[in-house]
Amino acid sequence: MVSLTSVQISSFIGSFWWPFCRFMGAFIIMPFLSSTYIPVKVRVLFSVLLSALVAPIIPSVPAVDALSIGSLLLSVEQLLVGFMLALFLLIMISVMTKMGAMMSMQMGLAMAVMNDPANGNSNPILGQWFLLYGTLLFLALDGHLVAIGVIVDSFYLWPIGMGIFELPLLGLVERVGWLFAASFMLALPAIVAMLMVNLTFGVLSRSAPSLNVFALGFPMSMLMGLLCTFFSFSGLASRYSDVCLDALSSMHQFIGG
């Protein structure tokens, strides 16, 4: 007869439960997987599947009683580790939304806002357009597979029970500044082109005061903005792939990779 102690049972349960918490914490905000269009049951089953696959190969887990307060704290810790890893990807995908918001403001389309039922907020239409493009490009580059691979590697690079305060949290905070810098650099060509258009109509208003600049300038600014948006897609894929690579590299370095 096989006899198991409570410590062995707790270790067996923990080897599956704590990886599940880390995966589930990442899938809460990971692009595409965090969408409300994907049912919660699908995310839970996907986390269960990945946890079952990595449970036999992860390093030894701490010997903690499954019904103790320490086990609860360890579960919360794994949720936070997965959440912070996926936060790099959320900031990366938000670059496209912020880029569209900057371009919409220059075009005069800032008031054209579309409700986003997936994320529960409202963004400019161009922001939603670029967000969809960025998500599809991220999936086409197999970025979601690389991200899941980084989470699997995190069990070796940052084993269960290492804590969260030893992580480079300041680097995660600095990614917020990187968000604005990357979105501004992507939107800079269109912003400069729209600035030249506004300067041109400013000169016209000074040289011909009788000309109704507002009636002429607004449709021309919008037309020029749409042309800039069209030409932005010509080189956006290569530039955004570099942004994705930078985000994934930072995600890997965050856990000591």
Image (cartoon, grey):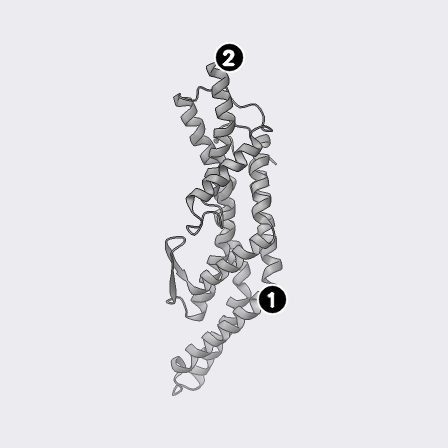
Q: Position of residue 242 (x, y in %)?
A: 61, 53
Earlier-in-chain disc, 2 versus 1: 2
Is residue 161 in view from this perspective?
A: no
Pointer 1: what residue? 234
The secondary element bearing badge 1 is classed as helix
Please, is residue 190 above or below residue 239 in the view?
below
Whether label 2 touches label 1, CB < 8 Å: no
Give the number of the mark in front: 2 or 1: 2
Please, is residue 203 above or below residue 96 in the view?
below
Which residue: 59% across, 32% down? 157
Camera-nearest residue between 78 and 23: 23
Which residue: 38% across, 67% down? 112
Q: Mark 2 and mark 1: span between their CA atoms?
A: 65 Å
Residue at the far front: name it. 1
Q: Amino acid at mark 2?
A: Ser
Which residue: 43% across, 78% down? 219
Q: Position of residue 129 (x, y in %)?
A: 48, 63
Q: Quadrant of the C terminus?
A: top right
Q: Residue 28 is drawn in which quadrant?
A: top left
Pointer 2: what residue? 3
Q: Position of residue 24 (x, y in %)?
A: 46, 38
Which residue: 58% across, 28% down? 56
> Horizontal placement of 147 versus 27: left or right?
right
